[in-house]
Each structure stands twice: as structure tokens, then as C-alpha cells.
Image (cartoon, rainbow, N blue to C red):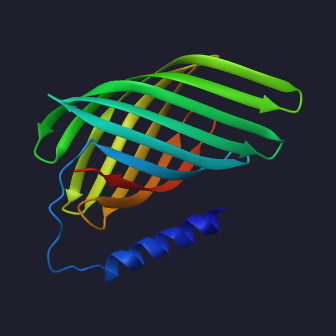
Amino acid sequence: MKTIYGLAVICLFHSAANAQTNAAPAVDLSYTYGELRFVDYDDNGGDGFRFNGSYDLGNNWIILGGLTSADFNSNVDLTIFEIGGGYVWNYRPDWDIVATGRFVNADVDTPGGSSDESGIALSGGMRGLLAPQFEVRGSVNYINLDDSDVYLEVAGDYYFTRQFSAGLSVELGGDSDLISIGARYYFR
């Protein structure tokens, strides 16, 4: 699996090097997007896909949602549905502080039966541009389903165009570490 991530990073940088570099696209931190990510649960031998979306309501308010589907080596399937909202504070140009709250429903199917849990998730973090085409994100996340869990997320995206970016994300410190690679399309 790590080989796939390595090849994806090489392809990402190769594409970036071959992209037009005469003028960097004018990137702003949009909150109206759709995102597709390949996720790998490093500790538990599972992987799958996550689709996230966000819509800017104006006046710094956003709504967001997501669907994750993952399969694990022991014939366990996980489906997570999230929906919620948040607030974006424009801390300074090209840097935002973001706080979100979401309703979360997780469905786990095993050979011995299934389990369905609902709860809440809260996140707080920053999002900003290190360079005109390179975004970084970091957040502290809390989720309460069957029991509580706190984890950190660190991510970075490269903007190929004003509307398309791709990058890596790492979530650490929870029940399992998660690495993902994906792309976002911004509906500006």
C-alpha cells in the first residue's frame, strides 16, 4: 500500500512540474467543493473510499457532509455517514480558522452480525496557503460514537488549476491511523 502512495506522490509532483508555470492560478480558499479520497486504515488492514462535500452558505457559514465506505481483511465492512455545519473565521488573508459540528452514523457489518452507532463529531483547525498553489490544513477532531476518540489531521493539497487540487491527508492518534490521497473540485 505504501508503494501506491509513493507512486501517487511521484505522479503528483511530475504533473505539477509539467503544469503551466507561467502564472500561478489565483487561488482562494473556497468552501464549495466535492472531494473523493482513497483511504487506508494503516493499523487495521482496511481501505476504501470517502466522498466529502461542502457548500458555502455565505456570511462565513458552511454545510458539509461525507460518506466513507471501507473493507477490512477480516470480512468487516464499515460505512460512515456524516452531515453538519460549521463556521469559517477569516483569520488573515489566505488563512482561515474553521470549526465544524457533525452528526455521524457508523454501520459495521461482520460475519457475526452488524452494529449501528450514531453520535457527534467536532473539529477545530486552520486552513491556509503556504504558497500560491499549495494549501495546508490541520485540525483537532473529537468523535463520540460507541466511545470518545480524539485525533489530529494534517493535510496538504496542490492546486493544478483554480478549481482542481489533489493531495495527501494523515489522521493520527485515534483508534487507528488513516492515510488518504484524493482530489477536490471547487465549484467557484
**Rendered residue at 74%/21% (across/down):** 115
For this view, does 43 lie left or right of residue 75?
Answer: left
The N terminus sits in image quarter:
bottom right
Q: Quadrant of residue 140?
A: top left
**Rendered residue at 77%/31% (across/down):** 109
**Rendered residue at 55%/50% (across/down):** 179
Residue that protrudes farthest toward the bottom in the picture: 18
For this view, does 101 lie left or right of residue 179?
Answer: left
For this view, does 120 lie left or right of residue 20?
Answer: right
Give x and y (percent) for residue 128.
23, 47
Q: Is residue 41 visible?
A: no
Residue that protrudes farthest toward the right in the picture: 112
Q: Is residue 76 visible?
A: yes
For this view, does 176 lie left or right of residue 98?
Answer: right
Could you say which is closer to the camera, residue 132 or residue 30? 30
Give x and y (percent) for residue 137.
33, 45
Give x and y (percent) for residue 29.
21, 47
Q: Is residue 165 above or below residue 7?
A: above
